[in-house]
Image (cartoon, grey):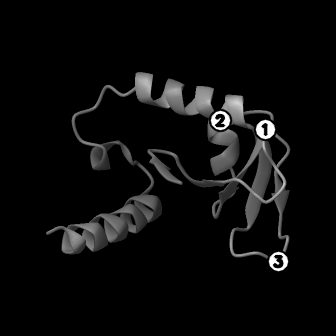
């Protein structure tokens, strides 16, 4: 699952053998901690996502619930203050716009 937030892009997956834990991955330093403060983040493990952490499934569900409950904007793109992140998100928006039928 990909999650785009104003200050974080994370990918969440279940690795084989894990049931109660999910692997949260990110490409940008600090993105995981912005959503899951206090988790142990590992870096540079030779994978396509530079940063990753194991997070309890229930903690992931709560964090995503809290994010949804805190939405107060009418336009997501306007909440992304970092220019580099905004431009990257616009690339995704554009690709999905082209995929729209």
Residue 44: give x, y in percent of width and height.
83, 70
Distance from Cα at disc 1 to Cα at disc 3: 24 Å
Q: Residue at horizontal 30%, vertical 50%?
A: 77
Residue identified by numbered label 1: 20
Residue 57 image label = none
In whole angstroms, how far apart are the C-alphas of marks 3 and 2? 24 Å
The residue lying at 23 percent from left, 73 percent from top is 99
In the image, farthest residue toward the left: 101
- Report the front residue among 98 and 13: 13
Q: Which mark is residue 46?
A: 3
Whether residue 56 sits left or right of residue 6 in the image: it is right
Marks 2 and 3: in contact by CB < 8 Å? no
> Nearer the viewer's eye, disc 3 or disc 2?
2
Residue at 34% from the left image edge and 71% from the top image edge: 91
Q: Which mark is residue 60?
A: 2
* Neighbour tally class for label 2: few under 14, some 14-19, many 20 plus, Cα within 10 Å: some
């Amino acid at each position: 699952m990909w999650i785009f937030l104003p200050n974080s892009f994370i990918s969440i997956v279940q690795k084989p053998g894990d049931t109660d834990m999910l692997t949260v991955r990110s490409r940008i330093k600090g993105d995981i901690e912005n959503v899951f403060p206090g988790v142990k983040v590992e870096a540079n493990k030779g994978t396509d996502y530079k940063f990753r952490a194991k997070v309890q499934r229930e903690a992931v569900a709560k964090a995503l619930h809290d994010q949804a409950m805190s939405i107060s904007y009418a336009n997501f793109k306007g909440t992304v203050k970092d220019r580099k992140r905004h431009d990257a998100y616009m690339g995704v928006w554009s690709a999905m716009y082209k995929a729209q039928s």
